[in-house]
Image: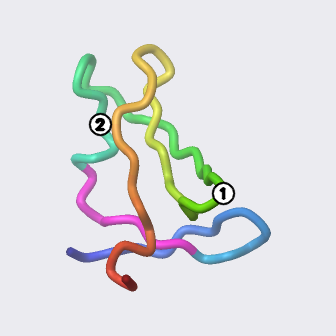
Amino acid sequence: MDYEGVEGPDGVEIRAPRDDEYRTCAECGGDCLREPGGADGLGMRIMFVCPEHGVQNIVDPFEEQR
């Protein structure tokens, strides 16, 4: 999978897939907003959220590094 660099919290570069399909709302087809998030023990994740329909996808930017 091809990735792009995205600036995350505290200026840390995180990577997200270049394929835009994961950024599209399954309900309305609109563009989702990118929201970085994390949790203790789970690491960093990027959520793609439709303002009308909620979370549509969650991407682990470090998936290839495991």
Is 66 displayed left or right of 12 in the figure? left
Tell me the residue that label 2 is attached to.
24
27 in relation to 43, above or below: above
Local crowd at mark 2 within 10 Å, few (<14), some, or many (≥20)? some
Front-most of residues 6 and 57: 57
At horizontal 72% and vertical 63% (from top left) the residue drawn is 9
14 in relation to 59, above or below: below
Local crowd at mark 1 within 10 Å, few (<14), some, or many (≥20)? few
Give the numbered dot on residue 23: none
Real-space Cα separation, disc 1 to disc 2, in angstroms: 28 Å
- The stretch of residues the image draws in magenta is 14-20
Q: Residue furthest bottom?
A: 65
Amino acid bearing label 2: Thr
Give the numbered dot on residue 40: 1
35 in relation to 14, above or below: above
At horizontal 23% and vertical 26% (from top left) the residue drawn is 26
55 in relation to 39, above or below: above
Q: Is residue 52 magenta?
A: no
Amino acid bearing label 1: Asp
Counting from the top left corner in percent of width and height, residue 66 is at 37, 82
For label 2, the SS is: loop
Counting from the top left corner in percent of width and height, residue 30 is at 33, 27
At horizontal 39% and vertical 85% (from top left) the residue drawn is 65
